[in-house]
């Protein structure tokens, strides 16, 4: 078995890195902090590259690729702290829309808009108006799930237009405003927005959650790498007692420890992506393992990098703070490391206990 990415996958990753190095710099991120709703043109660029519709089947106009092809791109998106909802749109929502497009006109139209115009999607784990949703403020539509009388439903809800079944988000202040977190003022789910229910909804939502764990984990890998890189460069330049702080054993050990956690997390994320694409029976457990390891790697990188910088690391002028904030947010999104370790334990007990 060939345990490596293909040349084409690595070339796609390299191409995206080159684009984001020019279009998603720390200065661009600061501009997004100042005005999160401003259109920087990045989403259009991603759409033209085929990144947005990567997981859409070829018969629907996409590239027809899987999560294995996407994780390297999400890692690059994390490395740049990309503000746009690539995880939500491409990793989570697109496969659900594709699965239902042949039977639901609403899904078919959304999928066509995603392929043809880079439709932005948000994904909500609840229709509860009190639950904040990342990407809600900039989304064209949102996938929502709700459980009524023990039966799961999935809804595709527009975020603009008139009528009671339109999700109208209100801004929510967060540590990282580029995530465009919003809270819906009412439950917009109704018969007109329902796209799946019962066993089908359970299966689709379970698959979506697995992809969410792995995709968020891949994004966290990129964030961790970027924070370590920033801090290594800082440690080479910052001097104490007449020599760079990077020459001190304590600083070396901190950064080496963070790098080790990152390198252990990477294969977990890659393997989980492969298992999901293959429909492996243990995919759910491995997706949780990936999210646990990736969350811990990013959290540890954030801790030691901030410690190496000192208080300046959290100031507006320091680039590190841009990646710290996203790491802290995503480490908890779609379940913390502790949550996923419990899921892994429960799965093992069910299988072997």
Image (cartoon, grey):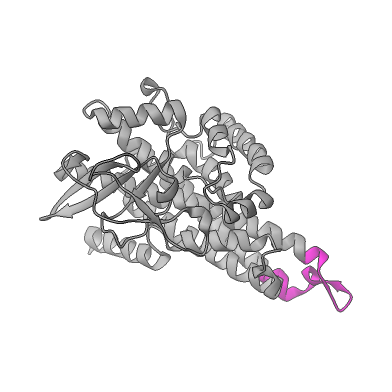
Residue 349 placed where, x, y %? Answer: 25, 64
Residue at left 41%, top 47%? 272
Residue 44 placed where, x, y %? Answer: 54, 33
Look at the image and tell me whether residue 241 can be seen. Answer: yes
Q: Residue furthest front?
A: 162
**Residue 46, located in which quarter of the rendered image?**
top right
Query: Does residue 257 lie above or below 56 as drawn?
Result: below
**Residue 87, located in which quarter of the rendered image?**
top left
Can you say which quadrant of the picture contains the C terminus?
bottom left
**Residue 277, located in which quarter of the rendered image?**
top left
Q: Residue furthest left?
A: 149
Assess whether residue 88 is covered by the magenta stretch. no
Is 209 on the left or on the right of 145, as rendered? right
Residue at left 51%, top 29%? 50
- In this rendering, the count of numbered labels is 0
Is 202 on the left or on the right of 116, as rendered? left
Q: Nearer the viewer, residue 172 or 213?
A: 172
Q: Residue furthest right?
A: 242
Residue 196 placed where, x, y %? Answer: 20, 40
Is 186 on the left or on the right of 260, as rendered? left
Main SS category, magenta section: helix
Look at the image and tell me whether residue 63 can be seen. Answer: no
Q: Nearer the viewer, residue 267 or 236?
A: 236
Q: Nearer the viewer, residue 281 or 184?
A: 184
Residues in magenta, as a range: 235-254
Q: Nearer the viewer, residue 192 or 1?
A: 192
Residue 186 placed where, x, y %? Answer: 26, 55
Q: Residue furthest top?
A: 59
């Amino acid at each position: 078995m060939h345990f490596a990415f293909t040349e084409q996958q690595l070339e796609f990753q390299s191409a995206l890195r080159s684009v984001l190095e020019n279009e998603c710099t720390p200065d661009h991120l600061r501009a997004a902090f100042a005005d999160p709703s401003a259109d920087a043109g990045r989403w259009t660029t991603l759409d033209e590259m085929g990144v947005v519709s990567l997981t859409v089947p070829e018969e629907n106009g996409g590239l027809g690729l899987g999560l294995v092809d996407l994780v390297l791109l999400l890692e690059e998106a994390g490395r740049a702290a990309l503000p746009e909802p690539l995880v939500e749109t491409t990793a989570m929502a697109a496969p659900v829309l594709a699965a239902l497009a042949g039977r639901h006109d609403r899904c078919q139209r959304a999928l066509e808009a995603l392929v043809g115009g880079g439709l932005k999607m948000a994904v909500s784990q609840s229709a509860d108006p009190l639950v904040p949703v990342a990407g809600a403020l900039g989304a064209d539509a949102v996938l929502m799930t709700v459980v009524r009388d023990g039966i799961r439903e999935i809804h595709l809800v527009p975020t603009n237009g008139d009528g009671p079944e339109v999700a109208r988000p209100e801004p929510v202040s967060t540590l990282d405003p580029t995530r465009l977190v919003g809270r819906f003022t009412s439950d917009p789910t109704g018969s007109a927005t329902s796209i799946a229910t019962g066993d089908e909804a359970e299966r689709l939502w379970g698959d979506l959650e697995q992809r969410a764990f792995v995709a968020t984990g891949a994004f966290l890998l990129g964030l961790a790498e970027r924070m370590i890189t920033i801090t290594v460069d800082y440690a080479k330049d910052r001097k104490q007692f007449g020599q760079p702080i990077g020459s001190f054993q304590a600083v070396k050990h901190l950064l080496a420890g963070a790098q080790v956690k990152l390198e252990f997390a990477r294969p977990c994320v890659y393997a989980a992506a492969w298992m999901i694409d293959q429909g492996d029976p243990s995919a759910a457990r491995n997706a949780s393992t990936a999210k646990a390891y990736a969350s811990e790697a990013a959290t540890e990188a954030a801790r030691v990098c901030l410690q190496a910088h000192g208080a300046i690391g959290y100031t507006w002028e320091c680039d590190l703070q841009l990646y710290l904030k996203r790491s802290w947010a995503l480490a908890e999104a779609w379940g913390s490391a502790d949550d996923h370790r419990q899921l892994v334990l429960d799965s093992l007990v069910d299988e072997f206990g």
